[in-house]
């Protein structure tokens, strides 16, 4: 029996494997990963510097330990070259083929890259894995000023974390205010004030056009004519679901790998979850959707077809200088925001045309205390 094959050993891959083993202890299980297969929680990457945690300190279990726990074979440092849905096999770059009865794509997302002019453009760093974090932490040795491109969720988390580690941070982006795609202006401005109180400087409504090496650091030229100097440049402009493997194999792909509520792709017996998946038209690159999807898929893989359900799942933005809780509003939602100042932050509520609460943005210690009560008023997502 070929068994179950999971591509990816991030939170999605390992969690669905654990859920499978709760219901099925015997089906052969193989996991394949590009890296060393160590189990860690990726959200910890954006708040590890201020805690002075090394990459090794973030590891919770090695691949060997996970293999024993799951009674699974874990193939580390393995690159998947192609997927043959007809032959039910995955071909590795090494030339080896791995057969499967059922396949799970838990391959995550990749950082969006942007091309800049200048001899320093190739030195721009991203952090999307434990190895990335190790390289970034090494590059920061002796550096007291960092330029961060991207004032979105991950960018704000990294900015606050680096400020907490004692560094000056220059945040650059085209948005009018931080978290511009998630929250109304009043909430974004409140967060900006909170982060600025920690010494973070924002360069908004502009973009980087050129990055030149300058001594031991870099000079970033902005479209508005300003220049920013820093010892390290970090890009956090967003993630894009990894869909190339699925698309090349003929699976339906849109913004992510398209799956139904059973997390089944357009080919029966092949599933996807996590940051790479588009579930019933929704791409939700957060932790809570993974923790909801994995138990359902674990049961499905064990022979008990189970549809995933998504309750309201607010997102916590890890910015200790000014905490934020957001329940994002659907882009197609009709309604309006109401905003009240609460302490040093704001309480922004989005009500639909019928008066029902459809989303919120809470910033600051006092306002965020209300998130649980407000969450209970929200409709389910799926």
Image (cartoon, rainbow, N blue to C red):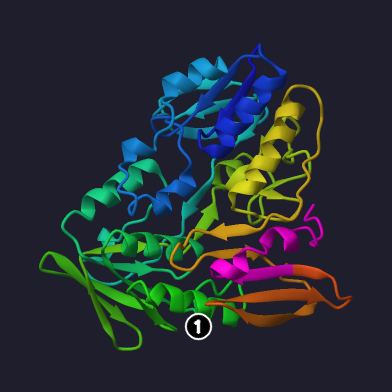
Query: In the visual, does 28 lie left or right of 159?
Result: right
298 lies above or below 266 = above
Comparing 194 with 271, the one in front is 194
Magenta region: 359-382
Residue 276 can be seen in this image: no
Residue 14 at x, y percent in the picture: 56, 31
Residue 44 at x, y percent in the picture: 44, 47
Give me the residue at 64% from left, 70% from top.
361
- What is the residue that sits farthest to the right in this orientation? 354
- What is the residue that sits farthest to the left in this orientation? 215
Comparing 368 with 281, the one in front is 368
Q: Does the magenta stretch include residue 375?
A: yes
Give me the residue at 30% from left, 61% from top.
124
Residue placed under numbered mark 1 in the picture: 176
Instruction: Count how many numbered circles sit on residues in the image.
Output: 1
Instruction: Report helix, strand or loop for mark 1.
Output: loop
């Amino acid at each position: 029996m070929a068994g179950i094959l999971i591509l990816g050993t991030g939170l999605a891959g390992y969690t669905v494997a654990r859920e499978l083993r709760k219901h099925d202890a015997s089906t052969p299980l193989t996991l394949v990963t590009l890296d060393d297969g160590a189990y860690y929680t990726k959200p910890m990457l954006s708040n590890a510097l201020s805690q002075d945690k090394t990459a090794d300190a973030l590891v919770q279990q090695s691949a060997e330990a996970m293999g024993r726990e799951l009674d699974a074979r874990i193939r580390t440092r393995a690159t998947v070259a192609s997927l043959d849905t007809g032959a039910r096999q995955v071909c590795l770059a090494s030339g080896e083929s791995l057969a499967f009865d059922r396949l799970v794509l838990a391959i995550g997302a990749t950082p969006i890259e942007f091309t800049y002019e200048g001899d320093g453009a190739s030195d721009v760093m991203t952090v999307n894995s434990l190895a990335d974090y190790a390289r970034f932490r090494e590059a920061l040795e002796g550096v007291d000023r960092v330029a961060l491109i991207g004032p979105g969720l991950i960018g704000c988390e990294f900015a606050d974390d680096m400020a907490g580690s004692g560094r000056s941070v220059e945040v650059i982006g085209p948005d009018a205010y931080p978290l511009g795609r998630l929250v109304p202006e009043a909430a974004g401005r409140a967060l900006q004030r909170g982060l600025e109180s920690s010494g973070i400087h924002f360069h908004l409504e502009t973009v980087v056009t050129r990055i030149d090496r300058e001594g031991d650091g870099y000079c970033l030229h902005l479209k508005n004519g300003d220049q920013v100097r820093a010892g390290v440049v970090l890009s956090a402009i967003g993630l894009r679901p990894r869909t190339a493997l699925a698309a090349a194999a003929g699976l339906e792909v849109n913004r992510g790998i398209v799956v139904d509520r059973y997390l089944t792709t357009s080919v029966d017996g092949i599933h996807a979850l996590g940051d790479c998946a588009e579930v019933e038209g929704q791409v939700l690159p957060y932790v809570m959707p993974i923790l909801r999807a994995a138990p359902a898929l674990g049961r499905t893989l064990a022979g008990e077809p189970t549809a995933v359900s998504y309750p309201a799942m607010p997102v916590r933005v890890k910015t200790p200088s000014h905490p934020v809780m957001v329940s994002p509003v659907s882009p197609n939602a009709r309604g309006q925001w109401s905003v009240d100042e609460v302490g040093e932050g704001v309480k922004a509520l989005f009500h639909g045309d019928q008066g029902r609460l459809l989303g919120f943005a809470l910033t600051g210690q006092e306002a965020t205390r209300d998130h649980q009560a407000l969450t209970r008023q929200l409709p389910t997502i799926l």
